[in-house]
């Protein structure tokens, strides 16, 4: 459909053995090494990450979003926090209260609840959003 995305490209970055970061990001960036004091084999890290991803993906293929939604919500850093959402050139602030069965972020605003399917979501206290 013209107005719908048919594919998603998902990317993540994992800082594994970084010992420090540039001054402008050191307050928000970290690495596995900084957090643990242990140097890791990057091949082992990516293998474990891909195995975990594959397990979740199999659950998703077998049971849809509902099969992984509870675990996602338990681990979601956004739910329960204040957010600023930029979508369709409009900015809305509120509290992220849930993720619905379609995967939309549910945000409680002064005007009521909205469902956010796409856009830029900044979480208060994370990555410079104060």
Image (cartoon, helix red, strand yellow):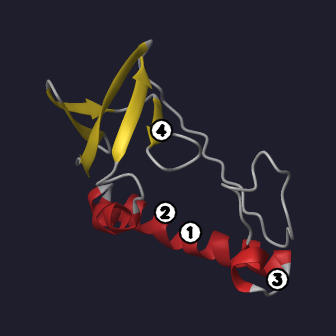
Q: Nearer the viewer, mark 2 or mark 3?
A: 3
Quadrant in the picture for the N terminus: top left
User: What residue is rendered at 84% in x and 84% in y?
Assistant: 39
Tally the numbered discs: 4
The residue labelled by disc 4 is 122
Q: CA distance from mark 4 to mark 2?
A: 26 Å
Q: Nearer the viewer, residue 64 or 71?
A: 71
**Mark toward the start of the polypeptide (4 vs 1):** 1
Q: Nearer the viewer, residue 62 or 16?
A: 16
Q: Disc 1 vs disc 2: Cβ atoms closer than 8 Å?
A: yes
The residue labelled by disc 1 is 54
Disc 3 packing (10 Å; few <14; some 14–19; many ≥20): few
Q: What mark, if any, has residue 40 been given in the picture?
A: 3
Determine whether, in the image, residue 115 is placed left or right of residue 62: left
In the rendered view, would you say 61 is above or below 127? below
Q: Disc 4 vs disc 3: Cβ atoms closer than 8 Å?
A: no
Q: Nearer the viewer, mark 4 or mark 3?
A: 4
Q: CA distance from mark 2 to mark 3?
A: 25 Å
The residue labelled by disc 2 is 57
**Mark toward the start of the polypeptide (4 vs 3):** 3
Q: What mark, if any, has residue 88 been given in the picture?
A: none
Instruction: Name which quarter of the figure residue 67 lies in.
Output: bottom left
């Amino acid at each position: 459909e013209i107005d719908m995305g048919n594919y998603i490209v998902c990317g993540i970055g994992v800082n594994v053995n970084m010992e420090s970061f540039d001054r402008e990001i050191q307050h928000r960036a970290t690495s596995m090494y900084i957090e643990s004091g242990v140097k890791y084999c990057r091949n082992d890290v990516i293998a474990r990450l891909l195995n975990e991803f594959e397990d979740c993906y199999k659950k998703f293929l077998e049971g849809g979003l509902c099969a992984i939604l509870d675990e996602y919500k338990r681990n979601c850093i956004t739910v329960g926090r204040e957010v600023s959402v930029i979508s369709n050139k409009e900015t809305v602030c509120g509290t992220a209260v849930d993720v619905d069965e379609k995967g939309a972020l549910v945000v409680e605003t002064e005007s009521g609840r909205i469902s956010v399917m796409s856009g830029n979501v900044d979480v208060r206290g994370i990555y410079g959003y104060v």
